[in-house]
Image (spheres, helix red, strand yellow):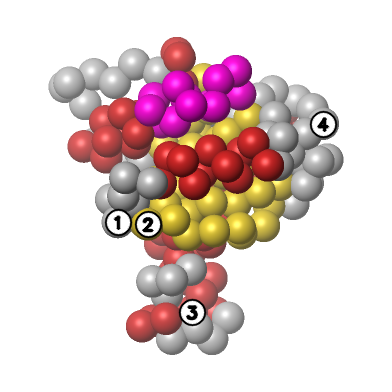
Amino acid sequence: MRSGKRIGIDVGKERIGVALSDTDGILASPIATVPHNHADIRIITKHIKNNNALEVIIGRPTNMDGSQGEMVHYVTSWAQKLARRIAPVPIRLFDERLSSAQAHKVLDVNGRKKCDHTSVVDQVAAVLILQSALEYESTTGLPPGTPLNETIVSEND
């Protein structure tokens, strides 16, 4: 396992969840929900730089059948804007199938009312994405996901 903090991000059209790992890459914790607006990249860039992140893991919204939907284009475009601000910190896209559904389930199990999910569900999804990526690397010894610069989004997907 490589040493260094990682930032996990769940990009939504309204909000962006942000999570942070410990230096040993064992545990992901929520750090912010950022409104998706003109300042989101700047705010998230500060989190990345303030934590001296080794890399950024962004959830790649893959359909259940493995195909890429409309959101993949949206997330990839957003990730490319972030990449220009944080270079040379690498960005990796990691499969996030069902992360939002799992996040809602975690909140339900912990007694959070559905009407209270909005403020934290994106953070929980970011934690789930990052934790899965950490576990992948711990198990395989390989960096998780696909580097953003190797990501090709087909118009047919």
Q: Amino acid at mark 2?
A: Pro
**Can you tell which mark lies on residue 108?**
3
Q: Quadrant of residue 96?
A: top left
Crowd rating for badge 3 (residues with CA inside 10 Å; few <14, some 14–19, many 20+): few
* Disc 2/disc 3 C-alpha distance (Å): 23 Å
The label nearer to you, 4 versus 3, is 4
- Quarter holding the C terminus is top left
Q: Say which residue appears at 39% left-offset and 25% top-offset.
A: 80
Q: Is residue 44 left or right of residue 5?
A: left
Q: Earlier in the sequence, mark 4 or mark 3?
A: 4
Q: Which residue is mark 1?
A: 14
Q: Which residue is mark 4?
A: 3
Residues marked 4 and 1 touching at CB (< 8 Å)? no
Q: Position of residue 18 (x, y in %)?
A: 53, 51
Figure check: 108 above or below 50: below
Q: Quadrant of residue 46?
A: top right
Q: Earlier in the sequence, mark 3 or mark 1?
A: 1
Q: What are the residue bounds of the magenta stretch? A: 79-91
* Disc 4/disc 1 C-alpha distance (Å): 32 Å
* Disc 4/disc 3 C-alpha distance (Å): 33 Å
* Disc 1/disc 2 C-alpha distance (Å): 6 Å
Count up the numbered dots: 4
Residues marked 1 and 2 touching at CB (< 8 Å)? yes
- Quarter holding the N terminus is top right
